[in-house]
Image (cartoon, rainbow, N blue to C red):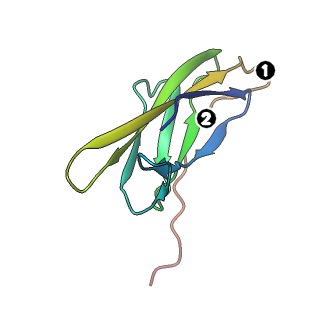
Amino acid sequence: MADATFDLGTNTQVPLSTILTDDDGDLMTGVPTVFSVPDSTVVTLTDNGDGTATAVRVSKDAGSVVITATATNADGTTASGTLTLSLASQVPPVEDVTGVEIVPGIPS
């Protein structure tokens, strides 16, 4: 996998997927891939359940974070790639959540 940089700007989230290739450059499928981020105070990751993830911005401040995707082969060897997300500072009127109400649905 390649290492790259993506400017998230002031946006709040971006979907992530991978393109897996073998030594010959042929596309591969069915290899489990895990996304990780070392600093969840900047960005968190949501597993979409289909091999993709969504990076969700947590911090309003400018900065960057490196996301790693690791594919694990059947023999246990791994390949990984990184994506650096750059974030611009969000300016007001950004508001923080201050209250949460849980609403029950219709019982079944």
Total count of labels:
2
In the rendered structure, are the residues bearing label 1 and label 2 in contact, judged by CB atoms less than 8 Å apart? no
Split into 4 quadrants, where in the image is the C terminus?
A: bottom left
Around disc 1, counting alpha carbons within 10 Å, would you say few (fewer than 14), some (14 to 19), or many (20 or more)?
few
Give residue 97's mark. Answer: 2
Residue at (20% x, 48% y) in the render: 76
8 to the left or right of 64:
right
Residue 70 relative to residue 97: left or right: left
Q: Return the residue nearer the eye: 61 or 35.
A: 35
Q: Position of residue 2 (x, y in %)?
A: 52, 34
Residue at disc 1, secondary structure? loop
Residue 68 appears in the rendering: no
Q: Amino acid at mark 2?
A: Val
Q: Is residue 105 above or below residue 45?
A: below
Taking depth in this image into account, of 49 and 20 the one nearest to the observer is 20
Marks 1/2: CA–CA distance: 14 Å
Q: Which residue is mark 1?
A: 92
Vertical order, 23 against 8 (above or below)? below
